[in-house]
Amino acid sequence: MLVFDARSLADAKPSGVHGVTRAWARGLAAALPPGAFVAVANAAGAGAVRARAALGPDVPLVVRRFPNKLLHAAMRFLGVPTIEALARAPRGSTVIANPHFLRVRPDATFVLIVHDLSYFREPHFFSRRMRLWHRVVDFPRLIARADRIAVCSAHTKRDLMELFAVPAAKIGIIRPSIDPALFSPPAAAARDAARAARGIPRDYAFVFSDGPRKNLAAALSGIAAAKTDLAVVVAGSEHPKAVAAAARAAGIAERVLALGYCDDRERAALLSGARLLLYPSLYEGFGLPPLEAMALGVPVIAAHGSALGETAGDAAVLVDPQDAASVTCAVERVLSEPAATAARVARGRERAAALRPEKAVKDLLMLIKDARHAPLRAKRAAAVVHYRHAHRD
């Protein structure tokens, strides 16, 4: 039995991690025979409805309704219940999960999904509450317990090897894809209706920001200095006051519109109508927004660091995220060089199309097979020891 921890799918505001989790859970459920897969969530009311809606009607799902704080404390400090017990799965099952408050049985095969290591590389990007969450979840213990680790990029694989001394053979790169049902160019009428509903002018740049590491200040400063009067649409859960402050500092407050959180459908419709996506993020484990823009035929400007260069390649203009002048130059290139921009857009469509959901599922199944045939876990504690020794106060 394959047990998929789908607790994150109950979240009220789905993120990129949510999209990857949803796609992989659906794909694995479809690829395995009846009775071989079950997803598990812990939610009541609207959260349970969201988890079911994310997976669709055909994916087996067990929903438990324990108070989350009680469940997390019991898992973290008492070691019970295991995720297999929550799912009512038999002993000897295989568990696949994102980092979370989590326990698995000693006889279980465990595949951990690691989307990025931003907390360990750049903890100052996180709120005090989120720093506490990462500490209490005890990520090093999960790394050490895992039989195999699925990552979204070679960049994250290198981070795991450096920070936790994880052997390369233990890590599999599973590249996410975008949902073609959502991120295909919509009809002009749908695109215009989404824009009109938000009061967005016809010509605009699209910026995504949900916190400090998205580097909103550099994006706005860079576009402010460019020879363009494009409006700037900022989507994401960044606080409106933070967006307003960054816009004032850049001197373009009258051109910036903060949308707040957008669901997938609205984001796809609005992104598809943009003249460009500006994404100078300081750290990414993969970077889904550039891939979404490529699938929609939108020019992309992205940071050259972390995994973004790997994700975007030659289909984007890559910039130094610490240098606003680099961003300005890139904006002007995209807007003033139509032939070169069209060539990058064509490469972007090909790049997005090459990352198919079925390929990710096939690679996941191979990684799960490897995990089930892994030798006994005699050296699991080594990663914990390595990380904690290297990061002693």
Image (cartoon, rainbow, N blue to C red):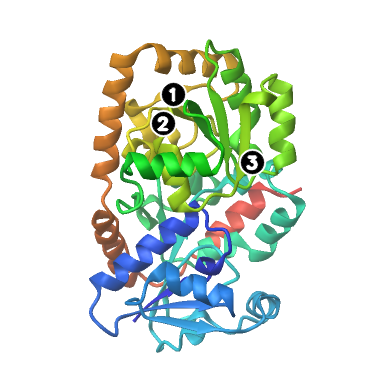
**Mark closer to the chain start, 2 or 1:** 2
Q: Residue 179: give x, y in percent of width and height.
A: 34, 53
Closest to the observer, 223 or 89: 223
Q: Quadrant of the N terminus?
A: bottom left
Which residue was labeled with disc 2? Answer: 309
Which residue was labeled with disc 3? Answer: 122
Residue at horizontal 60%, vertical 23%? 322
Tell me whether the residue at label 2 lies in contact with that at label 1, contact meaning CB atoms closer than 8 angstroms: yes
Image depth: mark 2 or mark 1 in front? 1
Q: Cα distance, mark 2 to mark 3?
A: 19 Å
- Under circle 1, the secondary element is strand
**Residue type highlighted by circle 2:** Gly
Q: Cα distance, mark 3 to mark 1?
A: 21 Å
Residue 340 as seen in the image, left or right of residue 148? left
Q: Which quadrant of the view contains residue 121? A: top right
Q: Residue 105: give x, y in percent of width and height.
A: 49, 81
**Mark closer to the chain start, 3 or 1:** 3
**Residue type highlighted by circle 3:** Glu
Q: Is residue 304 above or below residue 183?
A: above
**Residue type highlighted by circle 1:** Leu
Q: Is residue 43 above or below residue 237?
A: below
Residue 85 as seen in the image, left or right of residue 339? right
Which residue was labeled with disc 1? Answer: 318
Q: Is residue 287 visible?
A: no
Residue 293 as seen in the image, left or right of residue 202? left
